[in-house]
Image (cartoon, rainbow, N blue to C red):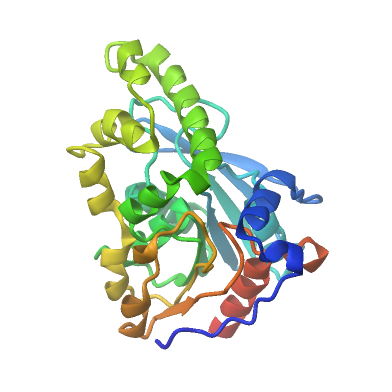
Amino acid sequence: MPIITSDYNPPLLFKNGHLSTIYSGLIRKVHGLIQHRDRLELNDGDFMDLDWSYASRPSTGVVILLHGLEGNAQRPYITGSAKQFNAIGIDACAVNYRGCSGETNRLFQSYHSGATEDLEAVVHYILEEKHYSNIYLKGFSLGGNLTLKYLGEGRYIPEEIKGAIAVSVPCNLYSSLLELLKPKNRLYAIRFKKHLIEKLRAKQLLFPERISDTDIAKIDTLKDFDDIYTSKAHGFKDAIDYYQKSSSLQFIHAIRTPTLIINAQNDSFLGDQCYPFKEAEQNNNVHFELPLYGGHVGFYGQNNITYTEKRALKFVEELY
């Protein structure tokens, strides 16, 4: 599909990618959304918590919302999306990955950028227990990578899944890592590392024989975290093996579900290989929009509705 020309043109202040990112992540507030929590028990003995919000009338449609690294279902980019989908008559299921709902998960493993088996479990649960006829996926950052990998890696995709939106996607995880390790992203990287190590400390209390103080002391960068914990806990050889096998870029060519990818050109988290020009041009099911502005999961919009929230609704409505 030809690359989509974007008309996103925010106020001057929000043309700054860092300001757009920080405003969305730390300052923006979304009010008026009521969420109800379900606990999904997984086949391996672990659990994920799902936070539901509903349209004002009974709906046959639901959007599954997938957050980014160290996010949760209460982040404004999730609640803002849920609120807008609810407003057009579509229910929302906001997924908290393992260990992201305020309670440490039961197993040594947690979540990662390629854990599509957990997304598959959510889809199966919704189909079996909720009986929606129209399901949409919307993922942000790590959640966007999960969305694209899930759709393209060769599994059976239920016919009820009608479309997907992926925002600020690190399609090539190693390319994104290299950006995050640059001085321009130092404050973001420090913040991510702080939260990840806090969770690892909680995990250490449950599994002291598998993670030591010495291991944790060796973690200086995000790559170190993935070498010491993520890769080992989830069956990868090392961080590089994890990045290679979990990156969605290699699966985009096989996506058969109508999919919209939105990556801003001034997203400081994304390296050159995170922009799937060739893959989108060669796949009629994939629409790739490349706004000049937006930062990472930013996309400031008037009336506290972001550009990607409006754009996602438009894309879904065009699928009817």
Identify the residue at horizontal 65%, vertical 67% (top origin): 309
Asked where in the image residue 277 lies, by quadrant, the reply is bottom left
User: Residue 233 placed where, x, y %?
Assistant: 28, 31
Identify the residue at image location x=35%, y=31%: 225
Question: Residue 96 placed where, x, y %?
Answer: 52, 42
Whether 115 is drawn above or below 109: the answer is below
Instruction: Give the left or right position of residue 105, taking residue 11 as reference.
Output: left
Q: Residue 234 vs residue 45: left or right?
A: left
Q: Residue at x 61, y 59 (%)?
A: 17
Front in this rendered view, residue 58 or 241: 241
Residue drawn 75% across the image and 62% down it: 13
Between residues 25 and 92, which one lies in front from this camera angle?
A: 25
Q: Position of residue 261 (x, y in %)?
A: 47, 71
Q: Is residue 135 visible?
A: yes
Q: Name the quadrant of the N terminus.
A: bottom left
Q: Nearer the viewer, residue 158 or 83?
A: 83
The total of numbered circles placed on residues is 0
Q: From the image, which quarter does the C terminus lie in?
A: bottom right
